[in-house]
Amino acid sequence: LSVAVPGEPGHFLINPFGLAFEEVRASSLVKIDLAGRRIGDGPHQVNATGFALHAAVHAARADAVCVIHLHTKAGIAVSMQPQGLLPASQHALRFHGDLACHDYEALAFTPAEGARLVERLGDKSAMLLRNHGTLTVGRTVAEAWV
């Protein structure tokens, strides 16, 4: 999870490397710049691998204040299906017309991979990364979570 710091352009908070989501507290978030470099001191390491994909989205979309990328069992299972998410439930219909797909190639360390991912995301708020997981964006943490 990454979120832009209000009033500090180019600065983001990200969950630290090595902690499970249930262990993360506001005090353990790490402040970084768009290149993934730590701002200030702290005991936690930066998850540079995790932020690479986020950085591409944050840089391309001003409305992407929060980016959430997950590897849940359900999300991975759906991302593996050739047809993706079927509009077969009220939960799935939430994404009707607002879901992009990206053939996950590798870690988004290269500018070219980041550019392809952002191009496929377009103006959508959610994306399936084929055989990998999910990504959502929002103007707030709550919007990205929902």
Image (cartoon, rainbow, N blue to C red):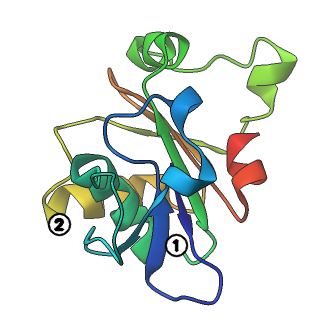
First in residue order: circle 2 vs circle 1: 1
Residue on which the image places disc 1:
61
Residue 3, numbered circle: none
Along the horizontal axis of the image, is 26 left or right of 52? right
Residue 72 lies, in percent from the top left, at: 49, 18
Q: Residue at x 16, y 38 (%)?
A: 106
Of 29 and 117, the residue lying toward us: 29
Of 132 and 15, the residue lying toward us: 15
Residue 32 lies, in percent from the top left, at: 37, 71
Q: Residues within 10 Å of mark 1 (few under 14, many from 20)?
A: some
Along the horizontal axis of the image, is 27 left or right of 131? right
Residue 30 lies, in percent from the top left, at: 42, 61
Q: Is residue 61 visible?
A: yes
Residue 142 lies, in percent from the top left, at: 77, 50
Spatial distance from mark 2 to mark 1, Cα to Cα? 15 Å
Of 127 and 26, the residue lying toward us: 26
Where is residue 133, by image quadrant? top left
Residue on which the image places disc 2:
111
Q: Residue at x 70, y 54 (%)?
A: 141
- Residue type at mark 1 is Arg
- Residue type at mark 2 is Pro
- In which quadrant will I find the C terminus? top right
